[in-house]
């Protein structure tokens, strides 16, 4: 397909999975849905897969069905050999407003179990994003609230419009940040700032989020599309084995000792040093030409 929005089911059928068991193939019920909660857009030859949350009338807040659709789209992109980078964005006025409360039950005796919801929906999503071997770009405009803020922080590189904001509003309804929120906030912003964001539930403007290290970059609103597109194109042109190794090593660094990390870097460098892309990169540098990486 070339540049057109498609259903996840169609994308799964047209992808080439690495896994012979065909992971990521969605159920037929999704193919029959009138409007997908997630749009999947793969440009042939570009190496870029775009995943767009598609509940704009609800600020792209999560339902169980949107969880399923988003995770299936991520699986399709992960298993498609032609995809080298993934972009996650939101349609409409904002990125994602977290959980859609209207998808929960508040009836006495039949209250939704929030622990079950987190365990079966939000936690698998965040784990899937962090485990994906391909770079994931977050593109944030408007509000990223609750689990939507955690989703943005879970991406490998997140770019936000200057007018965007991040909000951990859980405390206002008697809850705490989930979907990795407390983990991301403490590690990225430090304990004091994490405490303030979690306890006070105040909006954090995107420029401050960038200054604190919660996201990679904040750009003027009119520059958001171009910045994300250029970054995605740049990542798609880079050696995918090296990007995968970078992602894994940096994630492990948060729990490894320095000695462990030195060993990890040694082993990864040894593996990459025998790759085709390493030889291609060196030859391109020596001959002053653009490298053509193949991901092997």
Image (cartoon, rainbow, N blue to C red):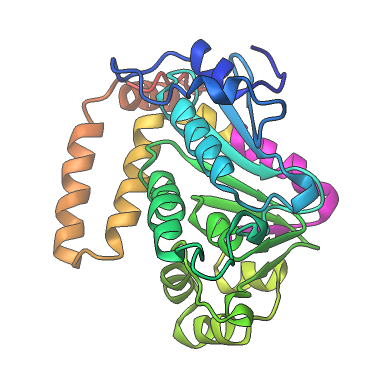
> Residue at point 14% right, 53% down?
263
Q: Position of residue 85 (x, y in %)?
A: 52, 33
- Most prominent secondary structure in the magenta stretch? helix
As rendered, which of 100 and 285 lies closer to the eye? 100
Q: Which residues are magenta?
A: 215-233
As rendered, which of 172 and 126 lies closer to the eye? 172
Q: Is residue 248 left or right of residue 138?
A: left
Q: Is residue 169 magenta?
A: no
Q: Is residue 240 left or right of residue 166?
A: left
Q: Is residue 47 visible?
A: no
Q: Indicate the quadrant where residue 253 lies.
A: bottom left
Q: Is residue 5 visible?
A: yes
Q: Position of residue 186 (x, y in %)?
A: 44, 76
Residue 189 vs 255, above or below: the answer is below
As rendered, which of 188 and 6 lies closer to the eye? 6
Residue 29 vs 268, above or below: the answer is above
- Quadrant (top left, top right, bottom left, bottom right) of the C terminus: top left
The outermost residue toward the front is 109
Q: Is residue 231 magenta?
A: yes
Q: Position of residue 151 (x, y in %)?
A: 54, 55
Q: Position of residue 12 (x, y in %)?
A: 50, 18
Q: Indicate the quadrant where residue 30 lies.
A: top right
- Quadrant (top left, top right, bottom left, bottom right) of the N terminus: top right
> Residue at point 68% right, 36% down?
229
Q: Is residue 272 left or right of residue 155?
A: left
> Residue at point 70% right, 52% down?
95
The number of discs equals: 0
> Residue at point 66% right, 53% down?
61
């Amino acid at each position: 397909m070339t540049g057109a929005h498609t259903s996840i089911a169609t994308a799964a059928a047209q992808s080439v999975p690495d896994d012979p068991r065909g992971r990521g193939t969605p159920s037929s019920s999704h193919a029959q849905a009138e409007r997908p909660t997630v749009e999947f857009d793969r440009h042939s030859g570009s190496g870029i897969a775009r995943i767009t949350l598609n509940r704009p009338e609800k600020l792209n807040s999560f339902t169980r069905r949107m969880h399923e659709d988003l995770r299936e789209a991520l699986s399709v992109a992960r298993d498609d050999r032609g995809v080298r980078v993934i972009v996650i964005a939101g349609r409409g006025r904002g990125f994602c407003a977290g959980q859609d409360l209207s998808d929960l039950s508040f009836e006495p005796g039949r209250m939704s179990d929030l622990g079950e919801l987190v365990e079966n929906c939000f936690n698998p999503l965040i784990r899937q994003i962090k485990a994906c071997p391909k770079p994931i770009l977050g593109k944030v405009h408007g509000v990223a609230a609750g689990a939507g803020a955690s989703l943005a922080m879970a991406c490998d590189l997140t770019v936000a419009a200057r007018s965007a904001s991040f909000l951990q509003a859980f405390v206002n309804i008697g809850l705490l940040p989930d979907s990795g929120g407390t983990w991301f906030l403490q590690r990225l912003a430090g304990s004091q700032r994490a405490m303030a964001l979690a306890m006070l539930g105040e909006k954090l403007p995107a420029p401050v989020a960038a200054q604190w290290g919660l996201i990679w970059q904040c750009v003027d609103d009119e520059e958001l599309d171009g910045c994300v597109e250029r970054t995605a194109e740049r990542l798609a042109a880079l050696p995918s084995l090296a990007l995968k190794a970078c992602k894994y090593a940096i994630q492990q660094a948060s729990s490894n000792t320095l000695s462990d990390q030195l060993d990890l870097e040694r082993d990864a460098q040894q593996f990459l040093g025998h790759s085709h892309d390493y030889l291609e990169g060196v030859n391109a540098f020596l001959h002053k030409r653009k490298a053509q990486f193949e991901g092997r």
